[in-house]
Image: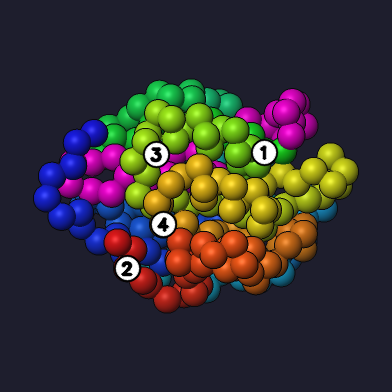
Amino acid sequence: MPKTGAMTTISALLVGGPTLHFTYAGLSFLTDPTFDEPREYPGPITLYKLTGPAVPASAVGPIDVVLLSHDQHEDNLDEAGRALLPEIPLVLGTEDSAARIPHITGLAPWRQHRVGDVVITAVPALHGPEGAEALTGVVTGFVLEAEGEPTVYVSGDNASVDLVREIAGRFPRIDIAVLFAGAANVGRFGDVDLTLNARTALEAAEVLADAMIVPVHAEGWFHFSETRERLIGMFEHAGRGDRLRVLTAGERAELS
C-alpha cells in the first residue's frame, strides 16, 4: 500500500505479556487480551502466571479492534480477556478460534479485513516446530497497513523465522514489528521453543530489514525459558541494539 507524506506516530501501552494497546490510523487496537492477576491454570500442562497486568482493562482506553493470535492458551487469552471480547466491536482471530468463541471474525492466512482506513492481513504463524499445530493448535499473526501510516507486523506466538521471511517477501516495507518472544517452552518438544527466543528474534529482525523491533510476551510467565534481558543483550552484542524499542509496562510511549 503506498504511503504519502510523513507517517504518523503510534501511541503504545504495554499491559504485560502479549497484551499491547496501540493507536493506528484513528483506531485503537489490543493484542491478545490478558488481564488476570497472577495465578495458575491447571490442565494437561499447568501454566503459572507470575506478573499481573500493569493496568486494568478499564484503564487502557477505547478498544476498536482486538487482534487475537489464538485462544487455546491462557497466556494469550485468559479469563478476564475472554470476558472483554463481547464488548469489542471487532475481534479478529483464526478460523478455529471463530468456531469456538462467538464475536470472533476468523481469517485464514493472507485473508484481509478492512476497518476504517486500515487493511488488516492475517499472516501465518507457527507455535513451535514444523507440525506443531496438532498439539499447540493454529495461531496467526497480523499485518496492518493504511495510507500515510507505518506498516505494522504483529507476529503472534510464532517461532518460525522462515515464516517471517515469507511475510517480509509479501510486505517488503515493514516499519514496526511487534515480536512475541520469551522462548516459551513447556517441554512438549524438548528444547525446541514455542515462540521466538533471543537468537531467532535477532534472525527475524535481520529478515525485517530496518523495522523497529518491539518485543512483547517476554516476561511474566514461568514457562518462558529466557529473560527479556537476554533478548536485549543478544541484540546489543550483535550491534543491533538500536533496532529494539523495549517498552515499560504501564507507561504509554510513542513509536515512530
Q: Where does residue 8 sit, x and y in percent of width and height?
A: 20, 57
Return the residue at label 2: 254
Give the number of callouts: 4
Amino acid on which disc 4 is placed: Met
> Is any atom of residue 36 visible in this view?
no
For the residues labelled 3 and 4, say whether their Cβ atoms are less than 8 Å apart: no
- Tell me which corner region of the image, top left, top right, bottom left or bottom right, holds residue 129: top right
Q: CA distance from mark 1 to mark 4?
A: 23 Å
Return the residue at label 3: 143
Return the residue at label 4: 212
**Side of 106 where 188 appears, left or right:** right
Amino acid on which disc 3 is placed: Val
For the residues labelled 1 and 4, say whether their Cβ atoms are less than 8 Å apart: no
Q: Where does residue 226 sit, x and y in percent of width and height?
A: 73, 62
- Seen from the viewer's position, the closer of residues 4 and 33 is 4
Return the residue at label 1: 127
Q: Which residue is at a point 29% across and 40% down the rendered structure image?
A: 145
Discs 3/4, front? 4
Q: CA distance from mark 3 to mark 4?
A: 14 Å
User: Which quarter shows the C terminus?
Assistant: bottom left
Mark 4 is surrounded, within 10 Å at the Cα level, by few (under 14), some (14 to 19) or many (20 or more) other residues, namely many
The magenta segment: 129-156
- Seen from the viewer's position, the closer of residues 226 and 40 is 226
